[in-house]
Amino acid sequence: MALDILYFAWVRERIGLPRERVESGAGTVAELVEELRGREERYALAFSDLTTLRVALDQELSDFSAPLAGVREVAFFPPMTGG
């Protein structure tokens, strides 16, 4: 399946891209992350600690165990803080 993947804040800085379209056979977000980690060192670094990341599927906050069936867009970003 084709997915639009968006990267925000330091995730974008580590990967070097704001967005990309990828072909994936992943069934869950966690499986997608494993595919991405295997691409290059910069992805492995960006996804080294999932406790520092949040994910949204089609602009709705989700978690890493969520299925990707029917999803068009996946966004990765650090937790937001108020102030």
Image (tube, grey):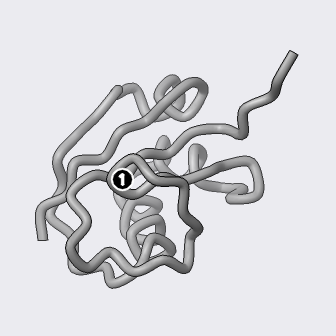
Q: Which residue does the image show at 12% across and 62% down from the upper left?
A: 2
Q: Position of residue 71 (x, y in %)?
A: 25, 66
Count of numbered tags: 1
- Say if 12 sits above or below 21 in the image: above
Q: Position of residue 80 (x, y in %)?
A: 72, 32
Q: Which residue does the image show at 21% across and 58% down from the upper left?
A: 72
Of residues 60 and 28, the one nearer the viewer is: 60
Q: Quadrant of residue 57?
A: bottom left
- Say if 11 sits above or below 45 in the image: above
Q: Position of residue 1 (x, y in %)?
A: 12, 71
Residue 79 left/right relative to 17: right
Dot 1 falls on a residue whose secondary structure is strand
Q: Position of residue 70 (x, y in %)?
A: 20, 73
Q: Amino acid at mark 1?
A: Val
- Say if 81 sits above or below 3 in the image: above
- To which residue does mark 1 refer? 74
Q: Which residue does the image show at 47% across and 28% down from the upper left?
A: 12
Q: Which residue does the image show at 34% across and 28% down from the upper left?
A: 17
Q: Residues within 10 Å of mark 1 (few under 14, many from 20)?
A: many
